[in-house]
C-alpha cells in the first residue's frame, strides 16, 4: 500500500523535494525558469477562477489547471501563497474523486502544508507568524479526511498548540480534542491526557473569547466616535469588524461547549476523583498537578469531594495564591460560611486566569446575596460582567438582589413594586447576551412580572405605562413603567 501511495505522490509532485535543503530566502521567487513559472501560474489561475465561478463543480475541473498548478508548486514554491490555498481546493477534489487513493493525496496535502509553512512562515499581509495556524489546519485536514489517521493528526495538532495556541481556529481545537480521545480509546495515551488537554484547550478558548470581547468593546467605542462625526464609511467598517469578532466569539463558545460535551464521559466526579487521587498520591507536592485537580473539579462541580478540599489545602499551604484562595472559598461557600468564603474570593479576584477572576467575582456576589448585602452583591456582579461581557449570570445576580430588596422600598409610591421593573430589566439583559442562562432568566422575569404594580395603581399615582421612572435608594436606576399582566 505504501509503495502505491508514494508512486502516486511521484506522479503528482515529482521527486523534487530536495528543495528542503536549500536556503529559501535565496531562491528566485519564480524559480530557475521564471518565464515558464509565470506562464503556468497565469494558466492555472485563469482555469481556477472559472472553476471557482462554477462553485467548484467537479465537472468543471480542468486537467490543464491541475497540471499547471503542479508545475508552479514544483518550480516556483515562493511564487504565491495562492499556490497553497488553491492547492488545498484542488487536492480536496482529487481526494473526493479518488477514494481508493485517498491516503496518497492526503500525504500530498501534508507536503503542501509543510511547504507553505516553509516558504510563507509569516502572513504576507500582516507580517505575523502563521506556522502554528498552518500546522493546525494540516492536522484538521488529516483528521477530516481520514479518522483512522487520528494519531498523525493528534501529533500535528499537539505541536501546533505548542507553537502558538492563539493562532488556532476553533475547528482545529475541536479536531485536537477529538483525536486526543481517539488516542486514549485506542490505548495510545493514558486517560489523564484527556484531562490535561481539556484544561489546556479550555484556557485557550477562554483567552480567545476574552481577546475578542475586548476587541468588540474597543471597536464599539471607536464606532460611537465615528457616529458622533457622522462618518458613515467608518461606521460601516466598524460594524463589519464587530460582526466578525462577535461571530468568532460564538464559534469559540460553540467549540467550548462541544469539548465540554465530549469530555462528559470522562468527567464524572467519580472518574475524575479516581484518576486525580492516584496522581496526587504519587506526587502530593506537585503544584501544577494540584492546580489542575482543583481547577477541573471546580469546573465540573465536583467540589464536595474530600479530594477537592485536600488538594485545595495542600495547594494553599505550598503556594498561597489567588487560585488557591479561590478553592478554599469554594469549600467554605459550599458549607454555607458566606462571610469567610467572601474573604477568600476577594483574594481570588487578583488571579491571572481570566475565567477564574470571573468566577471569583461571581461567587463573591453570591456570598453577598446570601448575606443580604445587596449593594456589595451588585458591585461584585458588575465586576464579573466587566471581566466577561458575554456572561449573563452577573445580571441574574443583580436582578435577584434588586428583587430581594423590594421590602426596603415599601414606603415608596408603588410600595416597593417598582423594584421589580429594574429586576426584570436585568433578567432580560441576561437572556439577551447569554443563551446558556436564557431559560432561567426568562423564567425569573415571568415570575416577577406578576408583582408589577397594577394598572390602577399606576394611574392613581399620576403615571402611565411606557413612561420613564427612576427607582431611588441604593438602586438609582431608570426604567420603564409597566403593569402586571
Image (cartoon, grey):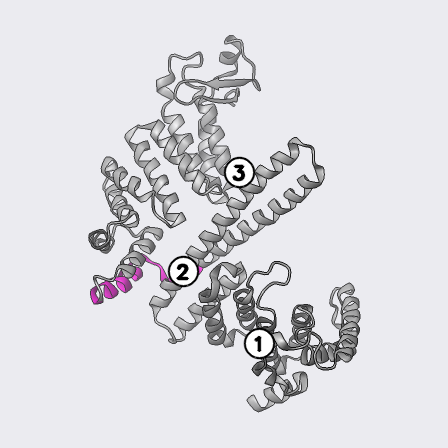
Q: Nearer the viewer, residue 51 or 275?
A: 51
Position of residue 153 relative to residue 21, above or below, is above
Instruction: Give the mark nearer the N terminus: 3 vs 2.
Output: 2
Say which quarter of the image contains residue 137: bottom right
Q: CA distance from mark 3 to mark 2?
A: 29 Å
Residue in the picture at 24% in, 46% down = 328
Q: Is residue 318 visible?
A: yes
Magenta range: 260-282
Residue at mark 2: 200
Secondary structure mostly taken by the magenta-highlighted segment of the chain: helix
Q: Identify the element where label 2 is drawn.
A: helix
Give residue 403's position: percent from left, percent from top. Answer: 40, 26
Residue 432: mark: 3
Q: Identify the element where label 3 is drawn.
A: helix
Task: Point out the frontmost of discs 1 and 3.
Answer: 1
Q: CA distance from mark 1 to mark 2?
A: 25 Å
Residue at mark 1: 110
Is disc 1 in contact with disc 3, using a CB cutoff of under 8 Å? no
Is the residue marked by circle 3 packed among few (<14), some (14-19), or many (20+) residues within 10 Å?
A: some
As for residue 234 lying within the magenta part, the answer is no
Is disc 3 in contact with disc 2, using a CB cutoff of under 8 Å? no
Residue in the picture at 26% in, 46% down = 325
How many marks do you count on the picture?
3
Instruction: Give the mark nearer the N terminus: 1 vs 3.
Output: 1
Q: Is residue 450 visible?
A: no
Amino acid at each position: 500500500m505504501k509503495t502505491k501511495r508514494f508512486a502516486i505522490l511521484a506522479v503528482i509532485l515529482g521527486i523534487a523535494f530536495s528543495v528542503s535543503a536549500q536556503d529559501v530566502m535565496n531562491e528566485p521567487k519564480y524559480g530557475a525558469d521564471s518565464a515558464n513559472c509565470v506562464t503556468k501560474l497565469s494558466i492555472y489561475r485563469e482555469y481556477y477562477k472559472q472553476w471557482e465561478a462554477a462553485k467548484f463543480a467537479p465537472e468543471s475541473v480542468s486537467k490543464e489547471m491541475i497540471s499547471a498548478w503542479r508545475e508552479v508548486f514544483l518550480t516556483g514554491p515562493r511564487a504565491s501563497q495562492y499556490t497553497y490555498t488553491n492547492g488545498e481546493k484542488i487536492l480536496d477534489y482529487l481526494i473526493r474523486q479518488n477514494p481508493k487513493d485517498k491516503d496518497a493525496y492526503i500525504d500530498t496535502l501534508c507536503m503542501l502544508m509543510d511547504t507553505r509553512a516553509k516558504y510563507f512562515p509569516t502572513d504576507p499581509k500582516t507580517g505575523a507568524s502563521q506556522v502554528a495556524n498552518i500546522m493546525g489546519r494540516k492536522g484538521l485536514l488529516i483528521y477530516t479526511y481520514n479518522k483512522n489517521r487520528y494519531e498523525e493528526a493528534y501529533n500535528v495538532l499537539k505541536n501546533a498548540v505548542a507553537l502558538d495556541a492563539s493562532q488556532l481556529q476553533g475547528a482545529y481545537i475541536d479536531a485536537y480534542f477529538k483525536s486526543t480521545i481517539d488516542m486514549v480509546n485506542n490505548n495510545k495515551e493514558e486517560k489523564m491526557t484527556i484531562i490535561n488537554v481539556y484544561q489546556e484547550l479550555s484556557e485557550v478558548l477562554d483567552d480567545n473569547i476574552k481577546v475578542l470581547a475586548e476587541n468588540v468593546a474597543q471597536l464599539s467605542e471607536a464606532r460611537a466616535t465615528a457616529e458622533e462625526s457622522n462618518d458613515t464609511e467608518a461606521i460601516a467598517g466598524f460594524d463589519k469588524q464587530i460582526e466578525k469578532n462577535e461571530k468568532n466569539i460564538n464559534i469559540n463558545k460553540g467549540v467550548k461547549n462541544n469539548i465540554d460535551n465530549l469530555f462528559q464521559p470522562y468527567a464524572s466526579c467519580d472518574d475524575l476523583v479516581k484518576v486525580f487521587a492516584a496522581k496526587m498520591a504519587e506526587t502530593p507536592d506537585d503544584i501544577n498537578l494540584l492546580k489542575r485537580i482543583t481547577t477541573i473539579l471546580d469546573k465540573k462541580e465536583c467540589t464536595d469531594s474530600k479530594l477537592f478540599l485536600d488538594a485545595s489545602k495542600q495547594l494553599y499551604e505550598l503556594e498561597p495564591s489567588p487560585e488557591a484562595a479561590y478553592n478554599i472559598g469554594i469549600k467554605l461557600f459550599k458549607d454555607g460560611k458566606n462571610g469567610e468564603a467572601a474573604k477568600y474570593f476577594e483574594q481570588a479576584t487578583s488571579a491571572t486566569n481570566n475565567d477564574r477572576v470571573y468566577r471569583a467575582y461571581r461567587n463573591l456576589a453570591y456570598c453577598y446575596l446570601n448575606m443580604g448585602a445587596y449593594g456589595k452583591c451588585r458591585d461584585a456582579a458588575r465586576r464579573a460582567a466587566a471581566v466577561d461581557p458575554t456572561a449573563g449570570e452577573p445580571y441574574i445576580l443583580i436582578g435577584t438582589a434588586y428583587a430581594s430588596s423590594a421590602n426596603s422600598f415599601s414606603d415608596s409610591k408603588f410600595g416597593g413594586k417598582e423594584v421589580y421593573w429594574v429586576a426584570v430589566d436585568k433578567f432580560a439583559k441576561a437572556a439577551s447576551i447569554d443563551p446558556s442562562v436564557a431559560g432561567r432568566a426568562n423564567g425569573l422575569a415571568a415570575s416577577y412580572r406578576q408583582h408589577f404594580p397594577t394598572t390602577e395603581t399606576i394611574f392613581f399615582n399620576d403615571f402611565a405605562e411606557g413612561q420613564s421612572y427612576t427607582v431611588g435608594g441604593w438602586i438609582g436606576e431608570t426604567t420603564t413603567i409597566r403593569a402586571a399582566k
